[in-house]
Image (cartoon, rainbow, N blue to C red):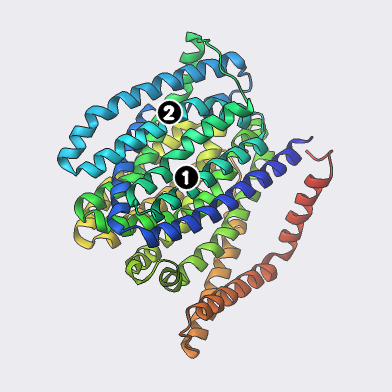
Amino acid sequence: MSLGRKTLTSLMYVGAEQYITVAVGFVTNILLTRLILPQYFGTLAMAWFFVGLFQTLKSFNLKAAIIQNKHANDDWLSTQFMLELLLGVLMLAISLPLYFLISHYYNVDVAFTMVLLMFFIFFDSFSLTPQAFLEKNIMFRKLALVNLTAKTVSSVASIIIAFAGYGLPSLIVLRGLPSILTAVILYIKGCWRPRLFFDRKIACSLLKFSSYLWLTQILMFVTLELDNFFVGTIAGLTALGFYSRAYIFARVPTNVFHEGIAKVLLPVYSQIHEDSQRLSRAFNMVVGSMVRVLTLVSALMVVSAPELTVLLFGETWLPLVRILRLLMIYLLLKPIVEHANVAFISLGKASITTKLLLVQAAILVILVPLFTFFYGTDGAALGVDIMVLVGFVLSYRRLSEFISFNYKSVFLPPLIGLVLSILVLYALLSIVRVENLFASIAIKSIVLSSVYISSLLLLERERILRMLKYSASLLFRRDVQ
């Protein structure tokens, strides 16, 4: 099977996994938000900050080092497995003394939740190497089924526990149980079996490659989670509950349009990175497609946020609408920025990602606590937007040194479509008042989507047809590279 066809079929499997997972997660979040008080979501978010911090400190992203190395064999995989296990035990040992420190400065619920989550996350150490084996060999069908099963079972279990009246335990199960289930399923299926082998030279090579990625992971954690710490510490756990819910929905486009795609395209970009013309063509096509879909999805989420919030969660959760709308720039640009990081890693330029994330982390550390102190959760959202905007500008400026990127063709048509669709929608709404929630959502969705898609067809009909034809050729012809 050609690389192009193998890539597209893998994208289809991962895409199916992502869409089903998002659908299951969306329903789960609706039910849990209705059943659980905001302060429990704040407790989980604060505990997850500490878990994520120590998980990031122990994570050298050795999986990426295996995937990027064309010559990695079973000795490399076994060495990676032993390193992952050693780092996992170290993280688990840290959790007990950390419990007393956190319970002193926050409360027992936050500390206890943190310890339980660290225990669950420890099982990632057993599954990271089998995942690296499957991703390196572009065997995403098996991996998609494993991930989907683990996340679905965890969601069902958390809903049952929440219905029984245990709010915080249900959230812990939702976050932690997938780690155990993923490890168990991977070993039952026999995707890759560990053996007791450790090579010091291989370990040093893995750690050397991953050293920049390790710092990148830390900085990525800062840019994704530190705002929760500031909001919870400055504005309180209830405010953090609203902010964390809005932030989760703002992450939906990234989860759908980047994380699954990145899993497939990191090994693909790594295989073609020496052919700059081919890499540029692939990158432009992927990012162009992402931008067009992301723009529509983000616009629909923002304009329909008030009706969806009342309909799905109840009026208690209306404060998250303003936060979500303020995160519009984050919604649009975060997946695009993270995809640039994938390209840097595939090119062997992980140090660039590290430096760019350092700038973004510095912006977040300076702006978010300051804005949160004066403006609460609104200020935190604005600080995050500024961070992502700066990251976007710097990332694509550096990327242009290695990849020919056509900004005009990638960004201009969807931007024009977005402006036109919003203008038409609000012109219509200024004339016609709709009180029914379902009718309002339907009108906004139909008008916005129709105008946006029509604009794209008028502006770039030939390009869209060419992309569809190319995708079809990859699916049905074996000779396309």
Instruction: Return the residue nearer the eye: 282 or 156.
Output: 156
The kind of secondary structure element at disc 2 is helix
Q: Nearer the viewer, residue 240 or 117?
A: 117
Above or below — where is 100 with respect to 323? Answer: above
* Screen quadrant of the N terminus: top right
Is residue 12 visible in this depiction of the protein? yes
The crowding category of the residue bearing disc 1, from other C-alpha atoms within 10 Å (few below 14, some 14 to 19, many at least 20), is many
Report crowding for label 2: few under 14, some 14 to 19, many 20 or more residues within 10 A (C-alpha): many
How far is the residue under mark 1 from the one under mark 2? 16 Å
- Residue 134 figure quarter: top right
Figure quadrant of the C terminus: top right
Query: Disc 1 marks which residue?
Result: 395
Kind of residue sitting beneath label 1: Ser
Q: Where residue 43 sits in the image (x, y, percent)?
A: 28, 49
Q: Viewed as shown, does residue 76 lie left or right of 392?
A: right
| Disc 2 residue type (three-letter) | Tyr
Residue depicted at 76% across the width and 60% down the height: 465
Task: Answer left or right for 308 relative to 20.
Answer: left
Residue 60: x %, y % from top left: 43, 27
Q: Position of residue 256 (x, y in %)?
A: 55, 51
**Label 2: which residue?**
212
Label 1 element class = helix
**Relative side of 461 to 87, left or right:** right
Residue at position x 50%, y 40% in the image: 341
Of the two numbered discs 1 and 2 on the same chain, state the one appearing first in sequence.
2
Residue drawn at point x = 58 percent, y = 30 percent: 186
Q: Residue furthest front?
A: 164
Q: Residue furthest left?
A: 104
Nearer to the camera, 361 or 113: 113
Q: Position of residue 380 (x, y in %)?
A: 29, 56
